Amino acid sequence: MFDVEFPVRSPEVLAPVIGQDRVDNLIATGDYARSELLGRRVVSINSTASGGGVAEMLPVLLAYVAGVDVGCDWLVLEGNSEFFEITKRLHHRLHGERGDGGPLGEHEREVFEEVAHQNQDDAQRLLAPGDVVLLHDPQPAGLAKWLHESKVPLIWRCHIGVDARNEYTKQGWDFLRPLLAPYIDQYVFTRREYAPDWVPNERLHVIKPSLDPFAPKNRELADNHVQAILQHIGILRSADSEQIGDHAPVERVADIVSEGPAPTADAQMVVQVSRWDPLKDMAGVMRGFLADPGCADARLVLAGPDVSSVSDDPEGQVVLAEVIKEWEGLAESDRRRIQIVCFPMDDPEENAFMVNALQRHAAIVVQKSLKEGFGLTVTEAMLKGRPVVASAVGGIVDQIRDGVDGILIQDPRDPAELGRALSSLLGDPTAANKMGQEAKAAVVSQFLPDSSLNQWGKALDSAMKPTAD
Ligand code: UDP
């Protein structure tokens, strides 16, 4: 287990975006939390410092928590490849999918407990007496028993879930229940429907993820700056790359699979940015893009992290290889319109600027997930005033009002429906732009850090009065 650094950000910086009243409200939440905690800290534990929604969101929230003088820390649990294979399997099952089809039985639970045990000494060293611990997602669940026995107030934050139940979700929850139910004081889910029925209602909190408008991932970038970054990393064609590259806050370049010259800045670009996970259905985006003649003049960019870099995501390599294989089988004229991009992850800030520039440059951002707890990429694109076309699955239906601030695809497995939605927006830039502006306003009103931190204040307050058996 290791400690991860994060920035400290005063809530006052949010004032130009959310107004002084909301800033004052956030400061008051901080004052209250401090008076309750009496110098103790809130320590988050997850299983990766980079890649994916949790690693994205945590430092943002922690920066503002620290900014209102509430003590907090971020620890990352370390595991082996067998452990991450099991956590990936569990992730799929909790989304109602078979995943690799492997078992979730006694042996797998022992692996969980063994990894927790291996992290225990570090946890003991890094935690201080009185800390409140927030466990994120299933990976650190094995620590709950020991932490509970050490009298640590515990909150479990589940970032995943599906509304509908099936045999796979049952297997996932049956696996987790004995690791969590006897020990957790408070539960936080993204939607009420995601919680299994053994989570007591009075200990359940619903908090929607938020994002930081000033983080490198989201901050405003001028058009020429956006172009400079995309030219430097190789997604856009560059007349004079050396000179333009000097202005980009990025040094590395992306690893790009493509054919023919990169597009120029004036080409309409359809973009999906996500991990290489089967549930993100990158290949499906490609099929939908190619299904409609209205997309014929546009370009598609499928972008995700360098697959060797996300430690808790062993499937990435396989999924990326499958997408590339499908791309290789396309007609040359189709291949020339599609770029498959892997962003270097060595420096999270540099990666964030790359994603920011790509989302900002997009004519349309897609999130064609087959399942999604809550799509951070959707909120990110909406904040940037981009029209988003996304599947009507999971938390995405709380993020997009269909036809107002984005388009929801009712059947995420139907390429034709995606193609039609893309082509309608590409053909009507004025409507697309209006949709993007609505999207930006919706994010400012609901999904910025003060909204979720005020709710976190309540969950924390409850956790300070332990209720677990
Ligand atoms: N992301 C990133 N670099 C990448 C791909 C994804 O920083 O190459 C980020 C993306 O911008 C978003 C997060 O990873 O902030 C993904 O969160 P989301 O909720 O969309 O999906 P998850 O990965 O949690 O399933």
Image: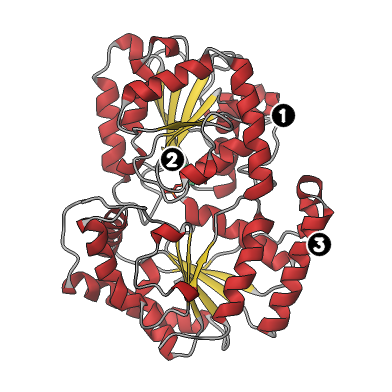
Q: Earlier in the sequence, mark 3 or mark 1?
A: 3
- Asked whether mark 2 and ligand 1 are closer than 8 Å, the reply comes as yes
Query: Compared to 360, does 38 lie above or below?
Result: below
Amino acid type, mark 2: Ser
Q: Position of residue 221 (x, y in %)?
A: 69, 33
- The residue where tag 1 is placed is 222
Amino acid type, mark 1: Ala
**With 275 as the anchor, is 27 left or right in this view?**
right
Q: What residue do we see at 57% from left, 27% from top?
A: 230
Q: Position of residue 180 (x, y in %)?
A: 36, 76
The dot on residue 299 is: none
Can you see residue 95?
Answer: yes
Q: Indicate the quadrant containing the N terminus: top left, top right, bottom left or bottom right.
A: bottom left
Disc 3: CA contacts within 10 A as few (<14), some (14-19) or many (>=20)? some
Disc 2: CA contacts within 10 A as few (<14), some (14-19) or many (>=20)? many
Helix, strand or loop at disc 3?
helix
Real-space Cα separation, disc 1 to disc 2, in angstroms: 24 Å
Amino acid type, mark 3: Asp
- The residue where tag 3 is placed is 24
Q: What residue do we see at 70% from left, 62% from top?
A: 8
**Nearest the camera: 415 or 226?**
415
Nearest-to-viewer mark from 2 and 3: 3
Helix, strand or loop at disc 1?
loop
Q: Position of residue 217 (x, y in %)?
A: 60, 43
Helix, strand or loop at disc 2?
loop
**Nearest the camera: 437 or 273?**
437
Query: Compared to 249, does 119 lie above or below?
Result: below
Q: Position of residue 366 (x, y in %)?
A: 46, 31
Nearest-to-viewer mark from 1 and 2: 2
The dot on residue 274 is: 2
Q: What residue do we see at 66% from left, 75% from top?
A: 71
Q: Earlier in the sequence, mark 2 or mark 3?
A: 3
